[in-house]
Image (cartoon, helix red, strand yellow):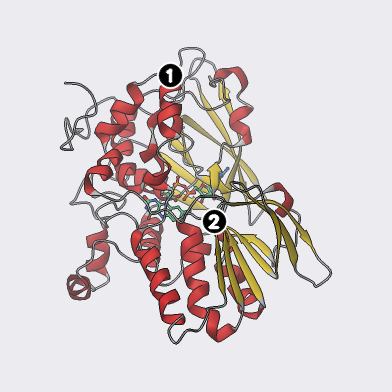
Amino acid sequence: MYDLIGVGVGPFNLSLAALLDEQEEVDTLFFEQTPKFDWHPGMLIEGTKMQVPFLADLVTMANPKSHYSFLNYISEHDRMYQFYFLQRLDIPRREYNDYCQWVAEQLESCRFGKRVTNVRHIEDHDSHFEVEVLDLETEEKKTYYSRHLILGTGTSPTMPGSAQDLPSNDVFHTSQFLEHQERCREAKSITVVGSGQSAAETFRELLKEQRDCGFRLDWITRSPGFASMEESKLNLEHFSPDYVNYFYSLPQDKKDEIFATQGLYYKGISNHTITDIYNLLYEYSVGHEEPDVGLQVLSELNDIKPNENGGYTLECRQWQSGDRFTHESDVVIMATGYRPNVPEFIHDLGSYLQWDEEGRYKVEADYRLETSESTSNEIYVHSGISHTHGVGSTNLGLAVHRNKVIINHLMGKNVYSLPKKSIFQSFQVR
Ligand SMILES: Cc1cc2nc3c(=O)[nH]c(=O)nc-3n(C[C@H](O)[C@H](O)[C@H](O)COP(=O)(O)OP(=O)(O)OC[C@H]3O[C@@H](n4cnc5c(N)ncnc54)[C@H](O)[C@@H]3O)c2cc1C
């Protein structure tokens, strides 16, 4: 009987596993379906960097002295001086992944190549969860027992319906970009659809290669512009424990209304990425050359179909003027975002859990799913909670804070003190 079983090992559960590794009285296991830790591998483009400082590693915000801190990773890899002269807080994304892999390899509690396929709640004198786990290599199923669960199942890529059944080597999501980079190099034309950070990073990478490879490059988005993320320091305070507490205290209809206005806090494009793209376009246009590139805003993709030229025809509509147009491309890359991954087996727990009117999790302030009866077995949750805990829920900078709250509840004591006030501005009237 374990105290806690984790489903999924992305950064959020990896952070929890690393912090709980220091707590001898708690027995834990974390199952991840992929063969090893890999953080959005299709988007580990060389030159991309983290959108949070390295201090938002897996442990530092809870315990800067932890063996699993990023600075210790740097030290253990004998890179202190290089990192010191680098003078950057925003480390390369590839390095963050390498750091997380270094942590994951040391944690006995993290098991890879294992998919959680079912969960049952057993109500008896020693009530617990039964967790069914499939070993993806041996195809063997095993059952594990735990008093509590934590869901760290992350997100799944979303693709428009019309794009889903097309050949995946030609029409794919940004989450698979690096897998298909060779295909892109051979294409005569490429179109990126969408205008968030992933779209911009993919477009920038293609733009760098465009003149050598010779393809036509287009970028189409429904948004009114290629909007930049709200990155001012005072605005970043929305990614703080204080704002989480304030947001959580509001009624659900208010939260939905506010969250809908906060897209640019997390969905826009980083300023430095837009600058890189603009600089490249400017360089390419020196000497009155017209770059073979198109940037089309205000235009929604309505349908995409294979055409007789071996490519694809995109049917689009400029939604302000109402003008319809078609656009042809050999390769189409969908930068159409992600949605919370709520595992099917959680739905199968039926009336044990409470769901809101929109079919979303109901979540307590300390990240426990609300249950219909009082129970001694908790399901904690990291993913799919933006509607309850706000815009910072998917942000790496708040993961350690959330894990501190979860550990305090799990262990029934104040293992970590929580900040009373961590920012300069006030959201609540004092
Ligand atoms: C390209 C990209 C870059 C990002 N960059 C940043 C950034 O710089 N800063 C920032 O703050 N945020 C960033 N984010 C947002 C966010 O922090 C990340 O998405 C982060 O990975 C979320 O961590 P997670 O642990 O919830 O989920 P994930 O990393 O999505 O991991 C979930 C894991 O659960 C596993 N899983 C799911 N179901 C099961 C099951 N049944 N059994 C076993 N395993 C299962 C999956 O295989 C997956 O590995 C980025 C997001 C993307 C897509």
In the image shown, does 118 or 169 lie closer to the viewer?
169
Res 24 seen here:
no
Q: Which mark is residue 273?
A: none
Badge 2: residue crowd in 10 Å (few <14, some 14–19, many ≥20): some
In the image shown, does 266 or 70 lie closer to the viewer?
266
Image point (19%, 69%), residue name:
87
Badge 1: residue crowd in 10 Å (few <14, some 14–19, many ≥20): few
Q: Amino acid at mark 2?
A: Val
Q: Which quadrant of the rendered structure holds the C terminus?
A: top left
Q: Is residue 367 above or below residue 264?
A: above
Image point (58%, 83%), residue name:
213
In the image shown, does 425 or 98 lie closer to the viewer?
425
In the image shown, does 226 or 234 lie closer to the viewer?
226
75 relative position to 15: left or right: left
Residue at the extreme top: 373
Q: Secondary structure at mark 1?
A: loop
Q: Is residue 10 above or below residue 279?
A: above
Q: Position of residue 376 (x, y in %)?
A: 43, 19
Q: Is residue 206 above or below residue 214?
A: above
Q: Secondary structure at mark 2?
A: loop
Q: Position of residue 64 (x, y in %)?
A: 19, 50
Q: Which mark is residue 376?
A: 1
Res 279 seen here:
yes
Residue corresponding to mark 2:
297
Image point (27%, 45%), residue name:
236
Q: Compare marks 2 and 1 and give the one earlier in the sequence.
A: 2
Image quadrant where residue 257 sits? top left
Q: State yes or no: discs 2 and 1 in contact (Cβ < 8 Å).
A: no
Q: Position of residue 184 (x, y in %)?
A: 62, 74
Image quadrant where residue 411 sits? top left
